[in-house]
Image (cartoon, grey):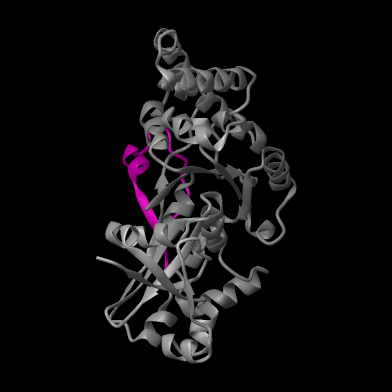
């Protein structure tokens, strides 16, 4: 299960069909910072065609982390706890306020989304700077010997330090594929991929506004992802009966909830794809990293499947539905036998053959 830190109580609570917006500070309910909500991906259509008894979704978990305040890297507010939570997630969805409302106060007394981004980024970089500088002496001592791994890590540490001291996040460190594992071992906060979520008012939900466009430009320059959402609309959708939601969205000029876009952006940020298995017992969604091959996908289900992988009987989702399930797709010539080098596509319906 993959996790994203989500810095907005409203969006988090909309996922659970709860209530409204409230910035968290040192004096507000600290229990919120450790809560989670899961976004599920499943397909009842497959279950119906396969006559499955059970539907098991795959999940992308959002961890509710309150906004960092200036000085968090040195323990201000609930900084140490928040930073600890961020270390445990796979990516950060940074919710940025892009709306004016005198009834909703801002901790800095102004609405400047880029300044908010820079405050958070600075605190994360300061925490990384402290973490990296603490490692240098020990790594240098080991690197003077014959410790090849320490030499490689020291090189990465120095490259990351050079960027951070220049005010740039560690995710911009140029690295080779073979260095990726060692780089991840550094556990740097600013190495995590970032998704900017522009929280706009209702009138700007469909088109964005000048403030959200500033954030979009920042994201473009960084190569980061960006989504525009109205948390107020999401909180209202969450309490509507399902049959009324489409009409409400249409009245707002929207074709789908913002949370749907957020979930898709989260999958894209983590570079994930979903494949399915379907049978009488259950229809189940599984998540793998984009580019995963057949044996790796089989290993997500069980390690024995990966070790003994022979082939994968594969049907595209659209074909599975169009031809009424596995038998119809096979008769139509749409079932493929894929080998060890097959790269799993998003939406594949797969049945693995393996040797015991």
Quarter of the image containing the C terminus?
A: bottom left
Q: Residue at x 70, y 54 (%)?
A: 208
Q: Residue at x 65, y 59 (%)?
A: 205
The answer to whether residue 96 is above or below residue 161 is: below
Displayed quadrant of residue 229: bottom right
Q: Left or right: where does residue 220 sit relative to residue 188? A: right
Question: What are the residue bounds of the magenta stretch?
Answer: 16-41
User: Residue 72 or 177: which is nearer the viewer?
Assistant: 177
> Residue 248: horizontal and vertical position, in percent?
58, 73
User: Residue 104 or 194: which is nearer the viewer?
Assistant: 194
> Residue 69: horizontal and vertical position, in percent?
49, 28
Queried whether the magenta region covers residue 129, the answer comes back as no
* Residue 26 visible (yes or no): no
Q: How many marks?
A: 0
The answer to whether residue 221 is above or below residue 204 is: above
Q: Left or right: where does residue 141 sit relative to residue 319? A: left
Q: Residue at x 55, y 50 (%)?
A: 269
The answer to whether residue 147 is above or below residue 45 is: above
Q: Residue at x 52, y 53 (%)?
A: 266
* Residue 187 visible (yes or no): yes
> Residue 59: horizontal and vertical position, in percent?
39, 59
User: Residue 30 or 215: which is nearer the viewer?
Assistant: 215
User: Residue 18 or 219: which is nearer the viewer?
Assistant: 219
Q: Left or right: where does residue 67 sit relative to residue 253? A: left
> Residue 345: horizontal and vertical position, in percent?
53, 65
Queried whether the magenta region covers residue 39, the answer comes back as yes
């Amino acid at each position: 299960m993959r996790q994203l830190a989500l810095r907005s109580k409203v969006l988090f609570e909309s996922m659970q069909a709860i209530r409204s917006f409230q910035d968290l500070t040192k004096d507000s309910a600290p229990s919120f910072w450790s809560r989670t909500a899961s976004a599920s991906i499943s397909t009842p259509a497959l279950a119906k065609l396969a006559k499955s008894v059970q539907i098991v979704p795959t999940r992308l978990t959002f961890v509710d982390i309150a906004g960092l305040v200036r000085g968090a890297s040195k323990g201000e507010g609930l900084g140490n706890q928040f930073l600890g939570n961020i270390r445990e997630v796979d990516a950060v969805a940074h919710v940025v306020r892009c709306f004016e409302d005198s009834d909703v106060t801002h901790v800095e007394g102004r609405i400047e989304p880029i300044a908010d981004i820079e405050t958070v980024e600075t605190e994360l970089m300061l925490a990384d700077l402290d973490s990296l500088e603490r490692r240098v002496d020990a790594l240098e001592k080991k690197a003077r010997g014959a410790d090849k791994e320490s030499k490689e890590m020291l090189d990465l540490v120095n490259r990351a330090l050079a960027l951070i001291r220049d005010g740039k996040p560690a995710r911009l460190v140029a690295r080779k594929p073979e260095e990726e594992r060692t780089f991840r071992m550094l556990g740097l906060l600013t190495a995590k991929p970032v998704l900017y979520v522009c929280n706009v008012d209702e009138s700007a939900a469909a088109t964005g506004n000048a403030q959200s466009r500033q954030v979009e430009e920042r994201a473009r320059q960084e190569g980061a992802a960006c989504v525009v959402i109205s948390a107020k609309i999401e909180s209202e959708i969450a309490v509507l009966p399902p049959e009324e939601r489409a009409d409400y969205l249409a009245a707002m000029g929207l074709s789908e909830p913002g949370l749907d876009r957020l979930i898709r952006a989260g999958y894209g940020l983590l570079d994930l794809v979903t494949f399915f298995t379907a049978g009488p017992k259950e229809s189940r969604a599984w998540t793998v990293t984009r580019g995963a091959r057949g044996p790796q996908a089989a290993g997500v289900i069980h390690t024995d499947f990966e070790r003994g992988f022979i082939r994968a009987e594969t049907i595209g989702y659209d074909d599975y539905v169009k031809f009424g399930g596995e038998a119809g797709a096979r008769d139509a010539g749409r079932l493929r036998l894929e080998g060890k080098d097959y790269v799993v596509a998003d939406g594949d319906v797969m049945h693995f053959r393996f040797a015991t």
